[in-house]
Amino acid sequence: MSSDPKIVIVGCGISGIAAAHRLVKAGFHHVRILEATARSGGRIKTGRLGNNTTEIGASYIHGPSEGNPVFCLARDYGLLDPEALTPENQAMDVDERPPWEPNWFSSSGERLSAEHVNPALELFYELVDDTSQFKNQEETQWASVGHFLRSEARQRAAERWRDKEEATRELLLCAISTMLKVECCSSATHSMDEIDLGGFCMYKSLSGLDCTFPSGYEGLIKKLMSELPGGLVTYSRPVRCVHWNNTGSGVNTVTVECDDGERITADHVIVTVPLGYLKKHHSTLFHPPLPLHKLHSVQRLGFGTNNKIYVEFDSPWWDQDCEVIYFVWEDEDAMVDQVPDVQGSWIKKLFGFTVLKPTERYGHALCGWIAGHESEYMETLSEQEVTHAITQLIRRFTGNPIITPRRVLRSQWFHDPWTCGSYSYPGKGCSVQDLENMMEPLPVKESQSQPLQVLFAGEATHPYYYSTVHGAFLSGCREADRLISHYSSISPSQPAK
Ligand code: 6YU
């Protein structure tokens, strides 16, 4: 192995870019990224809805404060609004639950007052907070987060709301169904029944009220890319197979085989493909195959779909100060987060909309959120069919039969062949060990002659910031640092400058 090794990074999302940045800065000269698509950024993807900027992928910096490297970069590059930079904003401890002003609508076309629905919201948030007691607990009586939330909600509601009228009690339980669907979007899962209770508590939030990029998240990618040497990324170059453990094959120990047949030799390969892609293609992506314990972790961790449906209107049908719109289906008092007939009633999974603010920048536009198999089915429909379903839904809930969207734009992450979904979540039975297995380099037992052949980065490899941009960024830095410290330990003066 040379003292200026050849390093290939598979994938040009934020984790791959972070790794390349760190390595180049440390003085490694032979770094290249192979990217399947024609663009950088992966799940950071900014689009347009008419004249407005929209985010097809990540929207927010979750927890924009000093401890968040993505916030620090965005701040230093001058990409954020002044409000996001204030100490007050950074100090807000909202646990990824922004105190948004809601408007509630019911399926019988009525506006519900926030006071009316508040007991449901309070109970739901209290239960989500109570999940933290299961941190580091291996065994619980609850099969999943969904099981815990539903069982406890049933019990506490029976005690707390026993003096309320039956119709009110039922409506509050229906509102809990809406909140379960919100939570499905946050975790990109089909149902909260699929999430491990202990795993759910591994996630850590950072302080700061979530903020967006006024000119688009991709601005961050552009800034980072402009600091990398030209030609470092080869686009439209999908990697088909990483041949590792090539004992006796000469100096270079890993061969990266591309879809077009080209074979590239390297000392180290950092694989950053999304977990959805890995789940689908692991058997052909690695030769020899992944060790069993790693494969089992790939399988145990969840990777699901959360999509957005942007809708623009000529004029608003929500209050001026409204920041989030919730839809409550009055036949869902069983606290459900999945629909029984996906094809016939997929739209019931859409919990509502967030309002794009400020209006001067975005016009009258909303972002609808839909997770799970219903979301995956939505992707197979034509834009016209989605627009029709959304229009009918809004007309029904507002009781206004003439509201008509001006434009609709949706994301389709499940059918993106290089992502196969949106982001990861801790599936049932998943533990810290699984996340550690995810980031473990190959070969597992470092041999003197062939250490650190394949390294793994990407959001799904971060033990507590999984599913986020900052988690992905940090994972890329972590794997770059692994190589940097490896080389500084065998040759302290080289190649790091
Ligand atoms: C965040 C947010 N956010 C919404 C939606 C999505 C995601 N996230 P990449 O996929 O970027 O890169 C891999 C590259 O590899 C890619 O370019 C591929 O083309 C390429 N590739 C694949 N196969 C290849 C091959 N064979 N050969 C070569 N190349 C190949 N995160 O911080 N804020 O608001 C959102 C959101 C709709 C889809 C998000 C958000 C997730 C991030 O986008 C994501 O983690 C990173 O961009 C991934 O970067 P990467 O480099 O790893 O992969 C308790 C608890 C609950 C937990 N959840 C709470 C937080 C909820 C997260 N919320 C997200 C919400 C939104 C709105």
Image: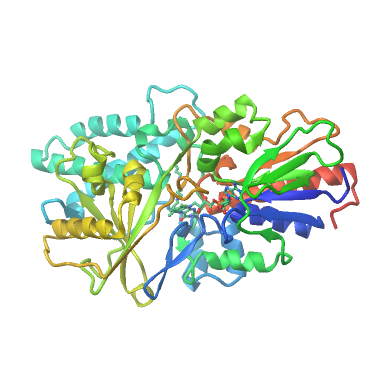
Is residue 451 placed above or below 259 in the rendered structure?
A: above
Q: Tell which of 467 and 441 is nearer to you.
A: 441
Q: Tell which of 46 and 415 is nearer to you.
A: 415
Is residue 309 placed above or below 282 in the rendered structure?
A: below
Residue 385 in view (yes/no): yes
- Determine the image quadrant of residue 293: top right
Q: Residue at x 72, y 29 (%)?
A: 444
Q: Residue at x 91, y 51 (%)?
A: 493
Q: Residue at x 61, y 25 (%)?
A: 292
Horizontally, residue 214 falls left or right of residue 366, namely right
Q: Looking at the image, which residue sits at the far front?
A: 261
Is residue 9 placed above or below 388 in the rendered structure?
A: above
Q: Position of residue 307 (x, y in %)?
A: 38, 52
Please state the total of marks drawn on the protein image.
Answer: 0
Q: Residue at x 18, y 40 (%)?
A: 332
Q: Position of residue 13 (x, y in %)?
A: 59, 55
Q: Tell which of 288 and 11 is nearer to you.
A: 288
- Determine the image quadrant of residue 103: bottom left
Q: Position of residue 420 (x, y in %)?
A: 47, 45
Residue 112 in view (yes/no): no
Horizontally, residue 231 falls left or right of residue 418, namely right
Horizontally, residue 240 falls left or right of residue 153, namely right
If the image is split into quadrants, where does the C terminus sit?
bottom right
Is residue 14 placed above or below 479 in the rendered structure?
A: below
Q: Position of residue 191 (x, y in %)?
A: 34, 37
Horizontally, residue 184 falls left or right of residue 387, namely right
If the image is split into quadrants, where does the N terminus sit?
top right
